[in-house]
Image (cartoon, coloured by chain):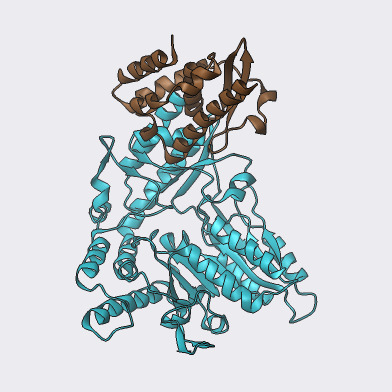
Chain colours: A brown, B cyan
Amino acid sequence: MTIAEKQAELVEAFSEFDEWLDKYEYLIEMGKALPSFPEEKKTDERLIKGCQSRVWLDAQTVDGKVVFSADSDAIITRGIIAMLIDVYSNRTPEEILQADDQFIDKIGLRENLSPTRQNGLLSMMQTIRQLAETAAQA
Amino acid sequence: MTTKEFRELFPILTRKVYGKDLVYFDNAATSQRPRSVLDKFLTLSQESNANIYRAVHKLSAEATDAYEQAREAARAFVNAGSREEIIFTSGCTAAINTVAFSFGQAFVKAGDIVIVGEGEHHSNLVPWQLLCERAGATLKILPIDDKGHWDLSVLKRLLAEGCPVAAAQRVKLVAVTHISNVLGLVNPVEELIRLSHAAGAPVLVDGAQGIVHERVDVQAMDCDFYAFSGHKVYAATGTGVLYGKKQWLEQMPPFLSGGEMVGTVTLEHADFAGLPHKFEAGTGNFASIATFPEAFETALLAREPEIANAYEEVCAYLEDALRARGDLRLYGESETFRGEAGPTGAYRRAGVFSFTIDGVHHEDVAQVLDKMGVAVRSGLMCAEPVIRHFGVSGMVRASLAPYNTMEEAEYFIKCLDKAINLLR
């Protein structure tokens, strides 16, 4: 599945819920399904700046693909980063850098987060792109 | 007047968010405004908009009248001795900064000491940090214990250390909050002021929360400065008051300078207008300030027994319901305060409930509650040292006003249960 296809699938999945509480619940479930993130990786270098809740993001390059792992101390934030990982992880740096992130607005996520979390979401996307760029240059 | 009738004075409280009735529990950040305040602002803007003090025409006279009536209303509300002791500012933060700059310039020198509470909002902490940096003075902290209460023995020690020989007090100011915006406890400011004055140190009280919940009488309290915002006590936003004892204000240089605050100006020199104008450079926020009479009237209405008693019941219910949860930690303990001469009041909770829940992030709770129509605050509440004192990364805060009802409190507790189940 391409990034665009994955994004479309998520937009579709979220559209099945009318209530935002149910959409949060869906996000929370994604967060819970995120593989555990080792404590020793929770370093300041992996901490994403600009989030009120703490989010750690790590990137490894495996066979030319960027593999992300992450954690957060807040469960909704964990759900958001899990969703982003679902879309962008295990892709080549070029795929990540060429993809857009309009699916976030299509889901309506941005407008349904507090302003601090909107900033956090922006920082997460920026960090994902930066890590992809670093991988591309390596 | 019943709570229901009181509530009807506030048009915003009938609105819905996400299709649900709004439950506004973020009153410690800003209170809602009654129709009378909104009308006053609109009427003045539509009919009497002109620059205050400066012109001889009718509109200016009306605007100036409204502004000065607001000064009298503020004077009466805190029982200040004279209108000259009431300085209008843009808010509590601006009021405290005025003292930090002006009082600081006049009285705080290298080697001096300023004492602030550990439980302060950043607005009553950072201005003193900066003053001490500028002046080469030292900032000392009056700590709180795990109940959120002051350790006044430390204050006494600091005051004594600051006064190595009689009449040479190096503690130039003690700045504390009347009610912490996190812990919500009424602090025994009278005792602190008595102790500080006995050692020759003046006291500034940050009244941002205190003015809302307490009957403030600055003369009885004997504070040297009392600062508060209008927008937390039903007035329009961008408004604040600095009460200062005339003896201090007269000795303090102006903070901002410009129009109206001057006496005679030549190209080389200016002398300054008398109080309170010396501290009111630039055009005042007159249409907003002019809502003070209506705002304070509303605050007094809320203190009438029928509404006040109902409000107390709502708060008592909320305290019990929150404490009933084993996985929830509510910060700040109510307790009788014993001064040196016996009990002289209490650390009473004033409508502010800050808490954490085991295994659930504060921001998640606030986010989910929002979608249920409940507005609360989460995070550091602009008081990071207080939050850190309790070893947590943030808290959820529900802060009430007398227009909040028992039904809302019960709905809040129900929503909180639901949110916790969802987030776990």
* Foreground pick, B392 / B193: B392
Instruction: Give how far across and how far down residue A34 sits, in percent.
Output: 53, 17
**Picture quadrant where residue A40 is located:** top right
Horizontally, residue A87 falls left or right of residue B341, namely left
Count of marks overlaid on the render: 0
* Foreground pick, B107 / A93: A93
Q: Is residue A51 above or below residue B405?
A: above
Q: Residue at x 31, y 76 (%)?
A: B51
Q: Is residue B146 above or below residue B209?
A: above
Q: Residue at x 60, y 12 (%)?
A: A64
- State which quarter of the image contains the N terminus of chain B: bottom left
Instruction: Give how far across and how far down residue A103 sits, in percent.
Output: 38, 24
Q: Residue at x 58, y 84 (%)?
A: B251
Q: Is residue B149 visible?
A: yes
Q: Is residue A133 above or below residue B391?
A: above
Instruction: Give how far across and how far down residue A66 sits, in percent.
Output: 58, 17
As drawn, the residue found furthest toward the front would be A137
* Foreground pick, B382 / A116: A116
Instruction: Give how far across and how far down residue B408 sits, in percent.
Output: 33, 41
Q: Is residue A85 visible?
A: no
Q: Residue at x 48, y 77 (%)?
A: B279
Q: Is residue B423 above or below residue B391?
A: above
Horizontally, residue B185 falls left or right of residue B37, namely right
